[in-house]
Every structure is written in C-alpha cells, then in structure tokens.
Amino acid sequence: MLHSIFRAYREAYGGLPNEIWVLSLALFINRCGAMVMAFLTLYLTNRLGFTMIEAGWILSVFGFGSLAGSYLGGKLTKPLGAVRTQIIGQFLAVPCYMLVPYFSSWTGVAVMVFLFSITSESIRPANHVATAQFTDPEKTPRAFGLQRMAVNLGFAFGPAIGGFLAEIDFYWLFVVNGLTTGMGGLILLWCFGFRKYAKSASSAEKQKQAERTSSHGSPWGDKKYFLFLGILMGVGLVFFQFHATYPKYLQEYYSLSKPMIGILFSINTVIIVVFEMLLVNYLQTKSVLRVIAWGAFFSCFGFFVLPFHQAFWFSVVSMSLITFGEMLCFPFCSTFVANRSTHRDQSAYMRWYAMNYSLAAIIAPAIGTPLYNYHPEAVWYASGIMSLVGLGGFYWLASDRAKSLEIPATPRPISVEANAEVQNQSDFETTSF
C-alpha cells in the first residue's frame, strides 16, 4: 500500500526538468508571503474604515493593475526573456508592497495597490511562457501542476501566518509580503543569473521565414480560444470573490476570526499540495476541456452552497468543493493554452490568458460588492448559475459541434521564439540594460 502511494508520487513528480523545479521554488518563496490579498478587504473596512463599495473599487483597481501588468509582462517576455522579466517584476514589487500602510486616503491606497499589482502580476505571463518553454509537450500538465503546487504550498503558509499578523498589526502583512516577493526574485537571480538566451543567426532567419509564411501565429483569428477565455472569464468572476466578498461573508455570517479565515485558506492549499499532482497525473490523458468543465462546475458550486449552513465544518466542506474544482480547472486551463499556442505566438497567447484573469479581477469586486450590499446570498446563488454555464460551455467546446472553430492546419517550422530559452548552456550570453 505504502509502496503504491510512493510510486504514484514518484511518477507524478519525476522526469520534470531542473529549470521547472527552480521556477517552482521561486514561486513557493514568493507565495509564502501571499497574505495581503487574503486580508485586503478586512484591512480596508476594519482598519481604514472604508465601506464595502469603496473596498470593492480598490480591489477593482488591483484588477486594472493586474491587467496592465499582465500585458506589460507578456510584451517584455520576448525582448527580455521569460526569467529576466520575472526577476525585474518581483524586485520592483517589494517597495510597492511596503509603502501601502503609509497611505490612509482612498486615492493614496488605490495608487499603491495599482503599483504593486502591476509589478507583481507582470510575472504571471512570463512564468507561463518559461514553464511551457522548458517542458516537453507530454509533460506540460505536470509542469503546470507543479507550479500551482508551489504557489499553493506557499499560500498555505501565507494566509495562516497573515491571520495572526493581522491580529497584531495589519502593517506586518505588507512588510512580510514585500520581503518574500524579493526573496523569490533572488532565487531566480541566483540560479539563472541576469542573462538572456542567445539565438543563432540561422535560427533567427528560420523564425523570420516562419512568420512570413504563416498567417496563423496570432491568437486573434482563433475563435475557439477566445470562446474559451469568455467562459473562463465567467468562472473567474466567481473565483475572485475569494478576495472580495468571501472573507467578509465568513466574518459576518460564519463569525470566523481572522486566524480562522487564514486557516480555512490554508486548508485549500494543503489539499492542493497533497492531491493535485496525483490528480493531474491521473487525468493528463483525458479530454482537457472536459476536465476543465467539471473543474469549473465544482469550483463555482462550492461558493453556491455557502448560505446553506453557518458552521465552521460546513465552510470546510464548501472550501473542499472549491478546491477540488480548482485542481481540475486551472492546471488544465494552462495546459490547454500551452498546447493551443504550440508553434504559434506563444507569448501572445499567454498574455491574453493572463489578462483574462486580470479582467476578471477587475469586474468581480465591481459586481460582487454591490450585490453583497444588496443581498449577501445573491452572490452565491449567482455562483450556482455560473457552475452550470461553465460545465455546459466547456463541454460544448470539447464536442464535435465546435470543430468548425478549429484553426486550419498550416505547416510551419517549430517556433524559435518558443524554444529560445531551452537551448543548452553554451548558448547563454550575459547581457544587461
């Protein structure tokens, strides 16, 4: 029995490139401080005295910064390189986090939240590109699963520690978040150096020829991809209630303290750390879109059941449903985008993918907080509707009826841009600004 369990974990984690482990370690260190967003609504309402509507608009400002950061990070990935873009973004985020507590006006807080969201979220598309570039296609689901495992393992520590720090003083949330963000950047700098992979002249010429001969490099003509993003947007509007209305609902209706809310977030991440890679490894041969469909259903359904009880054990049940859906949905969403963009403009695909999440982060609090003010349970009933929309929408994309949306096959050489960062170490060249 124990041998079978050990073998399952070895198969799930084995065979991934060393670069993926380094990227995952950096993400883990970074997300160990991911406590600001879990408690930002409580900080704004309890400490600064903002209304829920005002707090919601601050969270929408974060979303706008995230959108700008995702676009900027995607654009910088080509000229700077995927790893270097992450290093710069994390270093710039450090002072932005630490300065937030020195502002108490709505405008001042909004400006600082906008700045730390731009810098911290700029690493998302670069990280997706680096993960896809360093991994063979058949290992892509597990590579993205490991990245999410690292994020969630860090997030298991962040909110749990953050809940206790918030009891002492909200100020320490921002300090610790800034320090761990900087440590994530230092890990990447130490292991990769501030370098960019060089391309040979012949490879560059092949890339130019590929761009001239193919009219299908951009995601703009990919109708199926944008329908995928549209459905995922709806799921994101529910999921981003985690940062908007969810903590306030737990405090007001479940009577949970800040440490208890932090522990509940940690339950989410512990489940992911223990089970996600096993689940991804088991499901990696299944239909990606059908797996995503069930993930969308359960992640939204977990929010839907919140009003039906107010005991702590029931909040754990709700969180478990959300977590199960999250494990099915998000690593396979990244896999779908990575596979869809193979031999195409991968950074553009990843940029739109990251920006889609950012746009959801803008809209979610702008819709959720007024709806919460009107009737708190209405937010969760709307989540139930979205669970059915997500299940049906992704299933339709996986069906034969969606075949008319497929991109016509166009032979083209393997994209040098997509493989530039996986050349062997002799292709390195040290550059600087």
Image: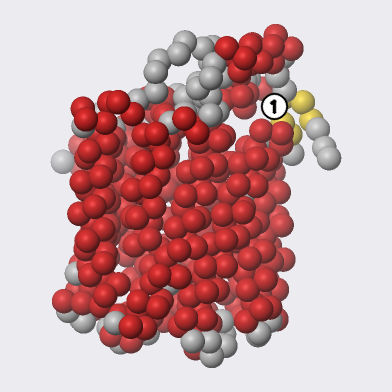
Other-residue count near label 1 (Cα within 10 Å), few / some / many at <14 / 14–19 / ≥20:
many
| Residue at 77%, 26% in the rendered image | 429
From this view, report whether residue 140 is shown above or below residue 382: above
| Residue at 72%, 66% in the rendered image | 95
| Residue 3 appears in the figure | no
Task: Judge left or right: residue 57 versus residue 300.
Answer: right
| Residue 41 appears in the figure | yes
Q: Pick whichever, 300 or 399, lies toward us.
A: 399
| Residue at 29%, 82% in the rendered image | 375
From this view, report whether residue 397 is shown above or below residue 232: above
Furthest-right residue in view? 433
From this view, report whether residue 228 is shown above or below residue 422: below
> Element at badge 1?
strand
The amino acid type of the residue labelled 1 equals Tyr
Q: Which residue is mark 1?
A: 197
| Residue at 33%, 71% in the rendered image | 264
Residue 32 image position (x, y, % from top left): 51, 61
From this view, report whether residue 133 is shown above or below residue 54: above
Q: How many marks?
A: 1
Q: How is the image coloured?
A: secondary structure
Residue 189 image position (x, y, % from top left): 69, 44
Residue 29: quadrant of the picture: bottom right
Which quadrant: the C terminus?
top right
Residue 137 image position (x, y, % from top left): 42, 25
Which quadrant: the N terminus?
top left
Task: Judge left or right: residue 135 versus residue 224.
Answer: right
Residue 220 image position (x, y, % from top left): 50, 33
